[in-house]
Image (cartoon, rainbow, N blue to C red):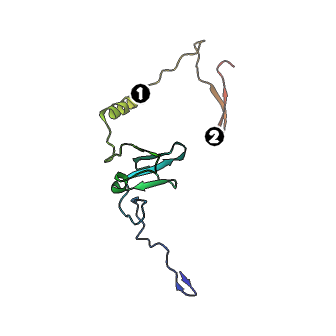
Amino acid sequence: MESRRGPLKSAVPSNVVSPVRRCSRTACGRPAVATLTYVYADSTAVLGPLATYAEPHCYDLCSEHSARLTAPRGWEVVRLAVDSGPARPTSDDLEALANAVREAARPQERPAAPGGGEADPVEVARRGHLRVLRSPES
């Protein structure tokens, strides 16, 4: 793109933008491993695992800055366990998933209508995605 003064330059070169979240501390370019959130009502700073999404009221910190974190006088620091790696499925998770799949695959039994007839309503007409249903008693 050209202007009267010459070619326009981007404010942030595209090769600097990285999909890896970086530490929020000034002049620190290390990857973030923890997220710091302040709870002002309780005078508490909460340091936990890296949040799923970067939010404006939270601060992402690298391992060095998260280890050296101190809070203002009178404030409490709550340190939640920081995950050291990606979560792996446990045997309990896999068993619960297998049970859910078995349950979904099991044929569903329909209760019989009191008069021995069909329990489902009968489709009388259709217009686009709408259906007109008549109950079996009618």
Q: On the image, which quarter does residue 112 sit in?
A: top right
Location of residue 51 in the rendering, given as x and y in whole percent from the top left corner: 44, 49
Label 1 SS: helix
Q: In the image, what residue occupies the spot 41% across and 27% down? A: 103
* Residue 126 relative to residue 9: left or right: right
The three-letter code of the residue at mark 1 reads: Glu
- Toward the top, the furthest residue is 115
Is residue 136 visible from the viewing direction of this image?
Answer: yes
Which label was assigned to residue 103? 1
Q: In the image, what residue occupies the spot 36% across and 56% down? A: 65
Label 2 SS: loop
Q: In the image, what residue occupies the spot 62% across and 24% down? A: 121
Question: Is 63 placed above or below 93 here?
Answer: below
The three-letter code of the residue at mark 2 reads: His
Question: Is 5 placed above or below 84 here?
Answer: below
- Toward the bottom, the furthest residue is 5
According to the picture, the residue beneath numbered tag 2 turns out to be 129
* Callout 2 crowding tier (Cα within 10 Å): few <14, some 14–19, many ≥20: few
State yes or no: discs 1 and 2 in contact (Cβ < 8 Å): no
Location of residue 22 in the rendering, given as x and y in whole percent from the top left corner: 40, 60
- Toward the front, the furthest residue is 73
Q: In the image, what residue occupies the spot 39% across and 52% down? A: 69
* Mark 1 vs mark 2: in front: 1
Q: On the image, which quarter does residue 25 sit in?
A: bottom left
Earlier residue among tags 1 and 2: 1
